[in-house]
Image (cartoon, grey):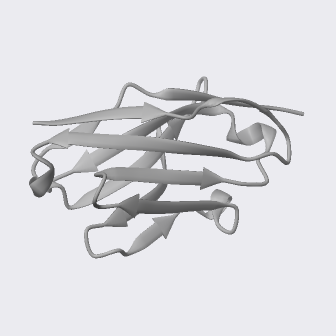
Amino acid sequence: QVQLVESGGGLVQAGGSLRLSCAASGSIFSIIVMGWYRQAPGKQRELVAATTRGGSTNYADAVKGRFTISRDNAKNTVYLQMNSLKPEDTAVYYCNANSGINAYWGQGTQVTVSS
């Protein structure tokens, strides 16, 4: 089992920045990919960014150049630095850990961007 605890959401004006954190605990040795997803009201959950154990990263087109995913292996924590935020970035952001067999989710953190 893997437990994920997110933090860092909030309300910000358009053009502002936020940094989300996701601390992992439990069977973290099994994790291959960690990522951030988001779900806006009335929409499906979508991938925002992901990073592999080897350090490869992947971003949704909508956030490329604005968001950066990074990880601190010593702290078992993944971060999502979000810059130049837009109202369309408003959503609940979820941390995800994938072992290739199981997928684990955090509780979600609300990000609201006002225009």
The residue located at (90%, 33%) in the rendering is: 115
Where, by quadrant of the figure, is residue 64 drawn? bottom right
The residue located at (59%, 24%) in the rendering is: 42
The residue located at (47%, 52%) in the rendering is: 79
**In this picture, is 14 found above or below 84?**
above
The residue located at (66%, 58%) in the rendering is: 62
Q: Is residue 44 visible?
A: no
Q: Is residue 64 visible?
A: yes
Tell me: 89 left or right of 37: right
Tell me: 39 left or right of 25: right
The percent coordinates of residue 7 (x first, y second) are 49, 32
Where, by quadrant of the figure, is residue 31 drawn? bottom left
| Viewer-proximal residue among 79 and 45 | 79
| Viewer-proximal residue among 105 and 29 | 29
The percent coordinates of residue 75 (x first, y second) are 31, 52
| Viewer-proximal residue among 52 and 48 | 52
The percent coordinates of residue 17 (x first, y second) are 74, 47
Q: Considering the image in quadrants, where does the N terminus appear?
A: top left
Tell me: 17 left or right of 63: right
Which residue is the extreme one toward the right? 115
Tell me: 75 left or right of 67: left
Where, by quadrant of the figure, is residue 57 drawn? bottom left
The percent coordinates of residue 77 (x first, y second) are 35, 50
**In this picture, is 98 found above or below 61?**
above
